[in-house]
Amino acid sequence: MIEILENIYYFLSKLLPYSFGIALIGFLMSFIADIAKNIKFKKICFILFLQIFVMGFIMFALQEIIIRKIRNEVVEILSDPKTQIITSRNDFEILPNELKKELLKIQDISPNHTGPEDKKPIEVISPKGIFKIFIGRDSANKNQFWIFTDRYEFGKEQEIGRVTSTLIK
């Protein structure tokens, strides 16, 4: 399901430049419609201009749905007792089982205009497959960590959530 939503999102992102062009045409044509005093023509121009906002809303909603589904799937995988995580002792001072418990606290935290400093990989081995989770410490809040995953293309680019913890170092 997530792959299908990702494909729809990427397809729409390819159409975005054309959508901007159509909106620009609609915007410019609206000036002609004002001069011509043609109501029907003005409505068409408005629809051409409005479609960029509809497209933006759809893409934003898709992005939120995809991220939420990825986050829920990662939490589901991590909550499975058969799932193991492998970390490098150099990256984290916390035991893998404790780190796993901390990762289960992942949540959606609103943006705060900061970024992850350095992403450290964690390998996740579960019955549903092997993938990596990347943890990056927030540049401003040292107890907050950004979570990414390579399980899906979208998770590589976008954070799937954040964890606030004093145990992860």
Image: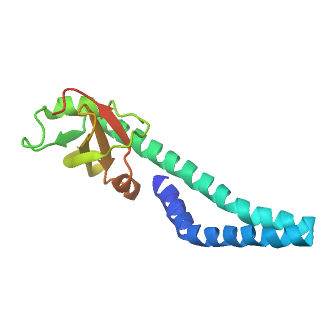
Q: Residue furthest front?
A: 35
Most distant residue in the top direction: 166
Q: Is residue 127 left or right of residue 30?
A: left
Is residue 134 at least partly visible in the picture? no
Q: Is residue 87 visible?
A: yes
The quarter of the picture where residue 93 lies is top left
Tell me if residue 139 comes above or below residue 29 in the rendering: above
Q: How is the image coloured?
A: rainbow
Residue 90: x percent and y percent? Answer: 7, 43
**Which residue corresponds to the image point at 33% horizontal and 30% vertical from the top-left?**
105
Where is residue 136, by image quadrant? top left
Which residue is pictured at 35% across the width and 41% down the height? 74
Above or below 12: residue 164: above
Q: How many marks?
A: 0
Name the residue at 91% across, 66% down. 40
Query: Residue 11: x percent and y percent?
Result: 54, 67
Q: Nearer the viewer, residue 115 or 90?
A: 115
Relative to 92, is 25 on the left or the right? right
Left or right: 157 in relation to 92: right
Q: Position of residue 34 (x, y in %)?
A: 86, 67
Quarter the C terminus occupies = top left
Which residue extends farthest left?
A: 90
Q: In this rendering, is residue 104 above or below 7? A: above
In this rendered view, identify the residue nearer to me: 48 or 55: 48
The x, y position of residue 160, in whole percent, is 38, 44
Please name the residue shown 40% across and 55% down the image: 154
